[in-house]
Image: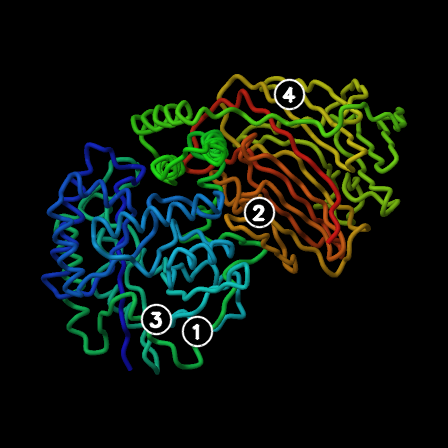
Amino acid sequence: MHLDLYNFFHLNLAYSAIAESDRSRVIERCYWPLLDLARRRDLPFSIELSGYTLETIQALDPSWIEAFVSLIHDGQCELIGSGYAQVIGPLVPHEVTTVNLRIGHALYERILGVRPRIALLNEQAFSAGLVPIYKEQGYDAIIMEWNNPFREHPEWDPEWRYFPQRAKGTEASEIALIWNKSISFQKFQRYVHGELELDELIAYVKSQLGPHARAFPLYGNDVEIFDFRPGRYMTEKVIHDEGEWVRIDQLYAALQDDPDLQFVKTSTVLKIRDGVNANHLLDLTSAAQPIPVKKQQKYNVVRWGVSGRGDTAINTRCWRLYEGLRKKANAVDSDWQELCYLWSSDFRTHIREERWNEFLTRLAQFEHKVAVLPSVVQGQSSEPQTHFKCYRNGRYLEIEGDNLAVRVNCSKGLALDAYTDKTISKVSLIGTLHHGYFDDILWSADFYSGHFVFESPGKHKVTDLVPVEPSFKMTSLGVEVSTMIHTALGDVNKLWIIDDANREIRLKYQFRWPEPVVGSLRLGYMTLNPMAFDRGYVAYQSHNGGRDLETFSMTEEIDHGSPLSFLLSANHAIGMTKGVAMIGDADKQIQLRIDKTDQALLGMITHQTVSEKKFTRMCLSALEHDDTSKPLVLEPFDVEIRYSLKFA
């Protein structure tokens, strides 16, 4: 009976809270003690760092690079890869992840003389679509956190956490899987910071011993938090009087003295291939958690997608740069490298003011170089579409063409009451579930489609669900129905286009809110009519950083947009990295499309059972609030959302 302990240390000089002037100090106080500890105690450490961090260390302290290379050549340390920059793969195009990994490999080989075979997913944000990309770029295995995927898969045997497994990807792909454990590395941090005593941590480690040999991740996280504080958080712990690297040394000394424990390299874990507990092919995702990440729920993809100081805006600008580089005949690797840098997660959380301003300047300079422009939506026909009947029916405006029948509610800001594709059914596919549909007082409301909701902590909601008098006209795109919504925050232009010829409806918003806001802005709601879809099977599909669609069967309760606390407005989202999401049954789906260069929105799914009836809905998030949020001005904010029927 023994326990193999493995460690990997994440080095990141682009860390959002570290000022550039502090980087040399971080190398001195955090990176050198790590190498000294490995050599002094003969510990087989694994070290992960991005190509950007590697370049920066080389420029500031090339002797550290020499010492690291020496430890690698001696077989004492090994390199874990991650790419050029800390890009969140499930939120960017697959081409960006590909080039990020490729450029990272080139830098590892040039500076260190080695090519890593194991990758740490950036922020441990996993999607099935990433697996074939990492395989193609030469990685044999990935490191991913155990805790969050396991929470969504209670059918897994808890013993599997101690053994290597295989992660299931799209395109019939798979990759070897090594576990990290958030609870373990957080206990390690608590001990180092003086919140846990040495004997308590050792007791926790020894509690992982079992009847057979096991492997356990003692530590797998940041190094910049030991004997260094960025001075960003009000809750930062005071550096321990003993010296935090002294405490770390004491921990390793005690663990090395225990005959039941031995330290191994991270790669050694992959050799445990035999036995009933290893090598299972696991789907790490679920409909409720399509993009699992590390640590507690507040660390979900919303954090890097639509919160921060202005994540939606800078992500949109990065999408435009991506499209610009794709069209640029003479784009070179240095251009793509710059895009990877600008898409790094470190600019999307607790970034210091001076670094934020420097980032915005660098982003603008690269936009000028690439000459990016906002996308322009083109019509599909030159002649007006004329086969329509349009008439007022009480509070409703009815619009009917040869293919589509659409009803909007003028008492509720042109909310979509019914959308019917007459070519397949007389039943509305999406629209409004009216008050009383659910025989449950907690659900005694109207559930609309085609509207927006803005919520700010401690304030009343702002919506477009108000009485309006619309105007409409015939155009080459179809019938256009428009109105102006006056809100407490400013005006919102709203426009529906009923494109009968292409069996599509479009919703356009123009927000003109001049004052800074903090909160949650969701729009384009799409509420399914349960009577139009199979009660036994409903699923959604989208891309989360991969080439292929990922399909999620909704057999469980899902609510990505439910708040985690007063501070955290959402718990999950889907990446929609090709601007498409579909939701429906095995025969038909409603397809929702956006242009990510228009606005880089994220998708959110809700699926609940209420009084034996199904409530299935999707919306788009333009803004969420969390601990990284700062007040920002939305203006100008224009977006177009397209809805259409798609057959399986």
Label 2 vs label 3, nearer the camera: 3
Badge 2, how many Cα within 10 Å: few under 14, some, many 20+?
many
For label 4, the residue is: 492
Q: In terms of sequence position, does the residue under pointer 2 or pointer 1 come before the other?
A: 1
Mark closest to the chain's N terminus, 4 or 3: 3
The C terminus lies in which quarter of the figure? bottom right
Q: Residue, x 40% and y 53% (percent of image)?
A: 124
**Which label sits on residue 571?**
none
Q: Camera-side residue: 370 or 173? A: 370
Please tell me the numbered disc located at residue 560.
2
Q: Residue furthest toward the front? A: 329
Earlier in the chain: of badge 3 and badge 1, it is: 3
154 vs 498: above or below: below
As measured in the structure, the alpha-carbon distance from the residue carrying label 3 to the one carrying label 1 is 9 Å
**Residue 246: horizontal and vertical position, in percent?**
13, 55
Dot 4 or dot 2: first in sequence order is 4
Asked whether the beta carbons under mark 2 and mark 3 sit within 8 Å of each other, the answer is: no
